[in-house]
Image (cartoon, grey):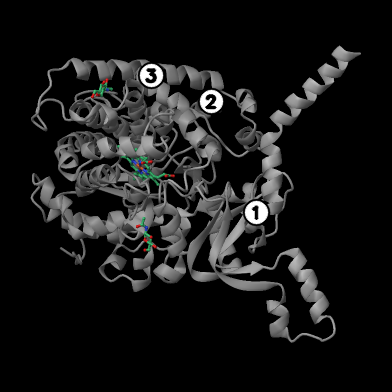
Amino acid sequence: MAPLLLFVLLVWAVTLYALRPLFKLVLSRFCSPLRLLPSPPSPSFLVGNLAQISDEENNDIFQSWAQLYGHTFIYRGFINCPRLITTDPLALAYILGHAYDFPRPDFLMEALAEAGAGREGLLTAQGDVHRRQRRILNQAFSPSHIKSLIPIFREKAERLRDIFTQIADALPSVTTTHTDHVLSGPDPCTVLRSPLEPACQPPSTRHRTSPLQTADSFTSTRPAVDVLSWLTRATLDIIGEAGFGYSFHSLPPPGTDHSSANRPESELAHAFAAIFSTSHSFSVLSVLAIWFPFLRRFRPNSRALQEAQATMQRIGTQLINERKSAPLSDEPFCGSRDILSVLIRANATSSPCQALTHSEMLSQITTFLVAGHETTASAITWTLYALARAPVAQAQLRAALRACDKDDLYTALELPLLEYTVREALRLHAPVRSTMRVYAGAAPDCFVPLQRPVRVRWPTWHRLTRRLRFRSRSLTAQEDGNYWWHPESSIHLRHGDIVTIPIQTVNRAPDLWGPDAHEFRPERWTTLPPAVRAVPGLYAHTLTFLNGNGSGTTGNRACIGYRFALAEIKVFLACLLRDLEFTIDDDVVIKKRTNIVTRPIVASSPEIGFQMPLRLRRVPPDEVVGAPNVCS
Ligand code: HEM
Ligand SMILES: *[C@@H]1O[C@H](CO)[C@@H](O)[C@H](O)[C@H]1NC(C)=O
Ligand SMILES: *[C@@H]1O[C@H](CO)[C@@H](O)[C@H](O)[C@H]1NC(C)=O
């Protein structure tokens, strides 16, 4: 009898232990002070509003909720737990400015770690470890060092320009009507007849192939070039060379035919493709796996993911060891100038208690890959897309670029119009559309200051006693409105409460940017509405790279690579747009889909996966653009 009892008790204990996260959730559902904030109705008991939110980029649901419920409200997550969402500038500055009190929630850290960032890199490090790492890494991302990387950016950008020019030249010369060229050109694998033409490859091989493998095969079935897959190759080469001195050879080298099939793909590129092609699309299982980690092993592809991660680790170790055995030099940029080299030099000269361990260094390599590759590819792709939809803005930028000396890239990079174009594209198409934070400060409660007060519901007991008090008289409409709610100038959070930072929603908020907030207008940057100055953004009053006023003591988790990204984006635009025109057919509907990074799909053929089909045309040197309004 006793053994049986013991066994039953044991089973109970294990079950209770396994269900601990659930108890915590249920507790927060009913006790969090957040539950009293306004919220949209929840369509599902299990996953709350999460399904609606997964398509946020296309349905702008945060924006429509903000219109109904104000700047600060909640939505419902797993088993309807409340999650805060706010576009209030003061609240955002507070939350992002106290980065160590508001880390990313575990499940987000886990997702990033699994996507390849490891558990010891800057993206996933916490508290003091993060502070120590950030201090050393800052040296490698200094403005002067980023400037020294521009020749690497330029080489890749010019290579891509040459490839695009080759493709454009294979098109019939009359390309001014963009809808119907019938192509039988020398290179049928780059361009195609009509958007609706059946694919010349079986769908099964096209389905879910990684961008890295698709540049050639996909374009054969398309009317235009998939700029996303080409840019993904180019930015992979760049983060490899400028980040840690590894040649991915993802773009075909000069002198080879861009369409030559079966180019060997570098090992690391292959591993990385495996990781990023795993589509973490919304499913109940993926939500459950957040809270019950043992479910993760049932997710598709997890074996392939592990193998890919192992490859990344092996190659990373090799790269570090190569650099460590290279003779040490005090000269800042003599020898290899990639970021990893600078890091290893900075580490060697730092005091032992500040230094990075081997596995921390290893994690930085994969962190750069995860954080700096698809993000920039997405940013440049969306910029080209925005310019394709705004031909006048594109022509003006081209005229400004052509007014600069062809060989003087540095002058072109300083053009105000180029800067405005980049700002506007990054505002409208933030590659990271939102992020999350969880309150984890020392005090159990926290009050986040607000610029604009929030409506808070009285707790149930309070409402009941009020009802008793007011029972005897009838209320006016005004009183009735205030009956259940009262305004508060701060948000009450308790330990474990989750906050969504709606990057894209803030970037496009009509009350900050005006009624045309959804339009691509680079010229808006010449005269900004004063309201946007309240946004605590690192760059251009946007949250695209997160916040600008974090410090060493409170933690700074803004994008460390933003100067790298901006320089890279500008070099590509300067090189590509000078000689090439990008257009898109009016009937092609582009939608956004987010898998860590927000990327485009074609609405009519989502099964093909991420793509951005743009048409290319080489612009003759003497082509006159109608009266450009160049702000230089
Ligand atoms: C347009 C391109 C880019 C965008 C939009 C972008 C955006 C962001 C955002 C929003 C974060 C904060 C994420 C969070 O805390 O939830 C971040 C962090 C980070 N980014 Fe970027 N990023 C870009 C390019 C790069 C590049 C090129 C690199 C490196 C070479 C890089 C390295 C990092 C790192 C290491 C972090 C973590 C910083 C920390 O936690 O201290 N990013 N980025
Ligand atoms: C960031 O700025 C906001 C207001 O602009 C301020 O309230 C907050 O304390 C600042 N945070 C830090 C860490 O400086
Ligand atoms: C960083 O420097 C310390 C000594 O200051 C050294 O022990 C450590 O191995 C170095 N880490 C790497 C990855 O080079």
The image shows residue 252, relative to residue 531, as above or below, that is above
| Residue located at (51% from left, 24% from top) | 205
- The answer to which of marks 2 and 3 sits earlier in the sequence is 2
The image shows residue 378, relative to residue 8, as above or below, that is below
Residue 399 screen position, x and y as percent: 18, 57
Task: Give the Cα distance between marks 2 and 3.
Answer: 35 Å
Task: Say which element carries label 3.
Answer: helix
Residue that badge 2 annotates: 202
Residue 20 screen position, x and y as percent: 69, 35
Task: Give the Cα distance between marks 3 and 1.
Answer: 41 Å
Residue that badge 1 annotates: 32
Quadrant in the rendering for residue 138? top left
Q: Is mark 2 within 8 Å of ligand 1?
A: no
Residue 173 screen position, x and y as percent: 27, 44
Is 404 in front, or is 202?
A: 404
| Residue located at (29% from left, 61% from top) | 392
| Residue located at (29% from left, 32% from top) | 239
Residue that badge 3 annotates: 313
